[in-house]
Image (tube, rainbow, N blue to C red):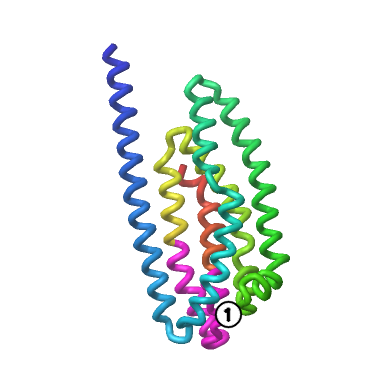
C-alpha cells in the first residue's frame, strides 16, 4: 500500500516538475522572440520594407505549417498515452511509425509547395516579389517541423513533457542567435540589401529547426 502511495506521489511530483519546465520554457520562448524581432525592427537597412518581406514570407509558411501539423502533438499524445496506460508499448510505437510516415508525406508536400510555388506565391498571392527568396529559405522547415510535431506528441504521451519543452526552448535560442548572426553575415557580404537580409532572417528559422531536430534525441 505504501509503495503505491509513494509511486503516486512521485508521479504527481514528476508531473508538476514537467508543468513548471513547460511554463518556464514558454516564457523564455516569448522573451527570445521579442529580442530578435526588436533587433530586426531596429537594424539599420532592414526597416519597414524588411519587416514586410519577412512577415509576408513567414505568413505563408505559418499557414502551410498549420495545415501540415495542426493538432498533431495533442492527437498523438492522446493515442500514445491510451496505449501506454494499458501496457501496450508496441501499439504506442506503431502509432509513432504510422504518424511519422503520414505527416512526413504531408510535410514534404508543404515543403515542395513552398519551394516550387515561391515565385507564384510572392508575385500573385502576396504581390511582394521580394518574398520569393524568403519563401525558398523557409521551405525545408515545414517537413522537419511536421516530423518534430509527431515526436513531441509521442513523448508527451509517454509523460516526457520536459523533453519537448527543452527542444522548443533550444529551437528558439538557435533562432534568436542565428537571426542576428545570419543577418550580420548577409550585411558583411552584400551590404544592406533588404531582400537578402529578410531571406537571411527567415533562413535562420529553417536552420534553427534543423539544429533542434538534430539534437532532439540527445536531450530525451
Name the spot of residue 5 as percent of width and height, x first. 28, 18
Tally of numbered tags: 1
Horizontal side, residue 3 vs residue 117: left or right: left
Label 1 neighbour load within 10 Å: few <14, some 14-19, many 20+:
many
Q: Which residue is mark 1?
A: 196
Does 183 sit above or below residue 192? above
Name the spot of residue 128 as percent of width and height, x first. 61, 77
Front residue of 135 and 218: 135
Q: Residue shown at 64%/36% (left/top)?
A: 97
Q: Where on the picture, by quarter, is residue 112?
A: bottom right
Is 169 within the magenta? no
Q: Residue furthest right?
A: 116
Q: Main secondary structure of the magenta part?
A: helix
Is 184 within the magenta? yes
Quadrant of the rendering where the N terminus is positioned: top left
Q: Residue furthest bottom?
A: 191
Name the spot of residue 192 as percent of width and height, x first. 52, 87
Q: Residue shown at 44%/76% (left/top)?
A: 40
Q: Residue shown at 49%/38% (left/top)?
A: 155
Q: Which residues are magenta?
A: 174-202
Q: Check disc 1 and report its element: helix, strand or loop.
A: helix
Q: Residue shown at 50%/26% (left/top)?
A: 82
Front residue of 46 and 70: 70
Q: Where on the picture, by quarter, is residue 33?
A: bottom left
Horizontal side, residue 105 vs residue 150: left or right: right
Does 182 sit above or below residue 4? below
Name the spot of residue 64 as percent of width and height, x first. 61, 57
Amino acid at each position: 500500500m505504501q509503495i503505491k502511495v509513494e509511486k503516486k506521489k512521485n508521479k504527481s511530483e514528476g508531473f508538476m516538475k514537467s508543468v513548471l519546465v513547460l511554463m518556464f520554457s514558454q516564457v523564455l520562448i516569448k522573451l527570445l522572440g521579442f529580442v530578435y524581432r526588436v533587433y530586426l525592427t531596429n537594424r539599420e537597412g532592414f526597416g519597414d520594407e524588411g519587416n514586410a518581406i519577412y512577415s509576408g514570407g513567414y505568413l505563408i509558411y505559418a499557414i502551410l505549417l498549420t495545415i501540415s501539423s495542426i493538432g498533431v502533438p495533442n492527437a498523438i499524445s492522446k493515442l500514445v498515452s491510451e496505449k501506454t496506460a494499458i501496457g501496450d508499448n508496441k501499439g504506442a510505437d506503431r502509432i509513432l511509425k504510422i504518424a511519422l510516415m503520414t505527416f512526413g508525406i504531408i510535410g514534404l508536400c508543404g515543403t515542395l509547395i513552398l519551394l516550387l510555388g515561391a515565385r507564384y506565391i510572392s508575385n500573385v498571392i502576396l504581390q511582394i516579389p521580394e518574398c520569393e527568396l524568403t519563401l525558398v529559405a523557409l521551405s525545408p522547415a515545414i517537413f522537419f517541423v511536421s516530423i518534430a510535431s509527431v515526436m513531441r506528441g509521442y513523448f508527451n504521451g509517454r509523460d516526457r513533457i520536459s523533453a519537448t519543452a527543452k527542444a522548443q526552448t533550444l529551437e528558439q535560442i538557435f533562432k534568436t542567435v542565428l537571426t542576428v548572426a545570419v543577418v550580420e553575415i548577409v550585411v558583411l557580404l552584400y551590404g544592406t540589401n533588404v531582400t537578402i537580409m529578410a531571406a537571411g532572417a527567415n533562413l535562420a528559422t529553417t536552420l534553427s529547426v534543423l539544429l533542434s531536430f538534430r539534437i532532439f534525441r540527445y536531450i530525451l
